[in-house]
Image: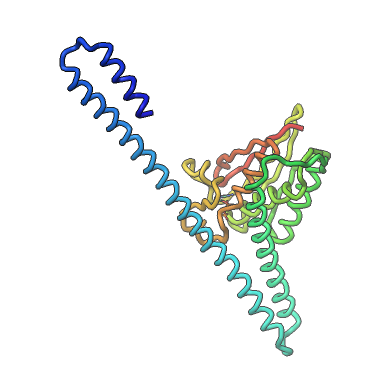
Amino acid sequence: MYVLLQLGWWGYLIIREDLPGNRTAMVIGEGLVFAAILIFAFVKLQQGLSREINLVRKEKNFMLAVSHELKTPIAAIKLSLDALKRNDLPLQKQTTLLHHSSSEIRRLQSLTDNILLASQLDQIETTKTTQVIPFSEILLEECKRFQIINGRDITMNIISDVHIRADSEMMRALFSNLLDNAIKYSSPESSIQVSLTSESHQCQLRIADEGIGIADSEKTKIFERFYRSNDEITRSAHGTGIGLYIVKSICQLHHFKIKVENNLPQGSIFIIQFAV
Ligand code: ADP
């Protein structure tokens, strides 16, 4: 680029040989081009570096979050199993410890599933699936599963018989990440609404919570890999910042549109639209 600009400038000066002060103009012109290129390169380098630094920082936070998310349930399961080894434990206590352990195991399983899926999604460009799956049924199953496991009130308004061409495991991951967040970022007494509606071959899935909500400035960032909001509530909730990255990648692979809006008076609504 520099060589081309220089050639152009010199060519112009040679043609206009008659102009006085050609040498000074040549030096000034070349100096200006050189300075412009230097500034441009510096800005680009600076942008690249800050992108890299940002990514390294996010990856470091992710590794810290993952090790915390792995260590905590393992320690809890170990404690429960140690306690269960005692013979004098009342039956009620034994049942509680078993329930607690199985919920920690579920947490470990969903974390490892998410990590594996995120690394697979990085390499997939299109879904190979030709399978038609019962979308409404899978959504209903996931909602009921979350309701039972978490003891939360989930209001379901799901039209039946929506069948689409999609990967069923990915659909389960999509629903479970959105439901998990709706539960995690809202108080246990609040309700969650899930609706699936259809109008002229366009379906709309809405998962609404009455939780802490998402600031407008964060609405696009939350879909980035490893991104976690910096506020106190998010940091104290368990998580690694890959859930919504997975959700967005699955939506892209299936040509779904996804957006997030404010729920009124409080909370968030994740909206997914697709054609049937
Ligand atoms: P994680 O929940 O593990 O932090 P996610 O990728 O699922 O990671 O979400 C990224 C961030 O988006 C969260 O850290 C949180 O700040 C925000 N977020 C996601 N879902 C919700 C929700 N339903 N309500 C409020 N904030 C949310």
Q: Residue furthest bottom?
A: 88
For residue 65, which quarter of the picture?
bottom right
Task: Tell me if 186 is positioned left or right of 19 in this view.
Answer: right
Residue at 59% over, 70% down: 72
Residue 130 image offset from top left, x and y in percent: 81, 39
Q: Residue furthest top?
A: 18
Task: Quarter of the image for the N terminus: give it.
Answer: top left
9, 197: nearer the viewer = 9
Q: Up-down: is 108 above or below 98?
A: above
Residue at 73% over, 50% down: 172
Q: Up-down: is 110 above or below 41?
A: below
For residue 133, which quarter of the picture?
top right
How many circles with numbers are drawn on the protein?
0
Residue 176 image offset from top left, x and y in percent: 69, 52
Q: Residue furthest left?
A: 21
Residue 29 image offset from top left, x and y in percent: 25, 24
Task: Tell me if 199 is positioned left or right of 107 in this view.
Answer: right
Residue at 49% over, 54% down: 58
Residue 193 image offset from top left, x and y in percent: 67, 46
For residue 79, which quarter of the picture?
bottom right
Residue at 61% over, 43% down: 269
Task: Quarter of the image for the C terminus: give it.
Answer: top right
128, 207: nearer the viewer = 128
Q: Up-down: is 9 above or below 170?
A: above
219, 166: nearer the viewer = 166
Task: Tell me if 23 is positioned left or right of 93 in this view.
Answer: left
Task: Tell me if 259 is positioned left or right of 8 in this view.
Answer: right
